[in-house]
Amino acid sequence: MSNKVGTIGVLTSGGDAPGMNAAIRAVVRVGLARGIKVMGIQKGYNGLLTGDVRELTARSVSDTVQRGGTILQTARCLEFLKPEGQQRGAEMCRVFGIDGLVVIGGDGSFQGAEKLANLGINTIGVPGTIDLDIACTEYTIGFDTAVNTAMEAINKIRDTSTSHERCSIVEVMGRNAGYIALWCGISSGAELVLIPEKGRPSDEEIIKTILQNKHIGKKNFIIIVAEGIGGSEKLAKKIQEITGIESRATILGHLQRGGSPSAVDRIHASMMGAKAVDLLCEGKAKRVVAYVGGQYVDYDINEALAMTKNIDEYMYEVSNLLV
Ligand code: ADP
Ligand code: F6P
């Protein structure tokens, strides 16, 4: 493998996700193993613009593989949306001698990486988001942990829901994507899963489903609502009002973004971080690492950003049959 790269930078951007630390650790240690100096950039593109950059050693990432969050912290950087911000970012890379940059984040972060690549900085994106909503890849770092965290919470909600014979509306994360909701629905045995990809059914349809389930002998009901659908409190009130079934809403919120990453997340994150470094070593730029058909592959960033992803229709159908 030819090694044209002397120094690389790594940053985490957008919403954090469990496993980001394992990805950072892999970038640092594989980078060092390839004879590359690695610089950690704090708080996403913000740190690049403010020069919040420090050298990372193998010891800087000790004891991090099991930690949630991101040791580099993350941020949303509005300045980077503007061409002047992007130019300053590229200049700062030059100031720090960074000739390759690994950006761990979601679609938005990849758009920033694409802009930097156009300004001559070799960039590689690593998919890090609990939402699983990056079209080019079958896996995004953080998804497995987030689903397991939500599933465990739903198990607990189910206990009390059963005791009281209630209907529980549980809202999970996913502003634009229903993957967390769908996986939680199947793994938790929900009566109904509401996801943005399918639109919101009417209250009447939702209530009809609950009454059908009551008719077949069910005594408690779990409805999983993706954040992008929202309105959980209102829905709980309406269900109680119309059916007489006591109903409660729980919004799980940011607890789904934290916690020690699962083995699945640690492994994908480690492999994707390593792949990003090796792509830079191969002289590649403007690429995104992806997991497809059991392999770690890479795509052109623009090609990746243009891809669209649909919810798995069969999974959605099955989620409705498992009641
Ligand atoms: P995610 O990466 O999780 O999708 P965001 O969409 O919030 O999160 O994007 C994270 C950051 O990436 C933004 O705050 C901004 O700094 C940068 N970014 C997003 N979109 C663009 C864009 N079109 N051009 C340049 N930078 C962008
Ligand atoms: O990381 C993705 C995500 O968790 C979305 O599901 C959610 O809508 C969003 O981030 C919330 O982000 P924040 O509260 O940090 O702005």
Image (cartoon, grey):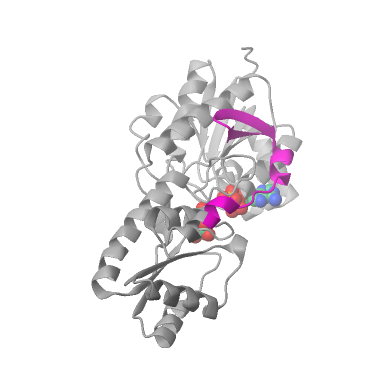
Name the residue located 33 percent from the left edge and 32 percent from the top edge. 63
- Locate the C terminus and report the quarter of the image it occupies: bottom left
Name the residue located 65 percent from the left edge and 16 percent from the top edge. 4
Q: Nearer the viewer, residue 282 or 7?
A: 282
| Numbered-mark total | 0
Q: Quadrant of residue 64?
A: top left
Name the residue located 42 percent from the left edge and 58 percent from the top edge. 254
Is residue 52 visible from the viewing direction of this image? yes
Name the residue located 39 percent from the left edge and 31 percent from the top edge. 61
- Locate the N terminus and report the quarter of the image it occupies: top right
Height in image: 116 above or below 320? Answer: above
Height in image: 36 above or below 49? Answer: above
Q: Position of residue 85 (x, y in %)?
A: 69, 48
Q: Position of residue 241 (x, y in %)?
A: 41, 87
* Residue bounds of the magenta highlight: 288-317
Height in image: 158 above or below 79? Answer: below
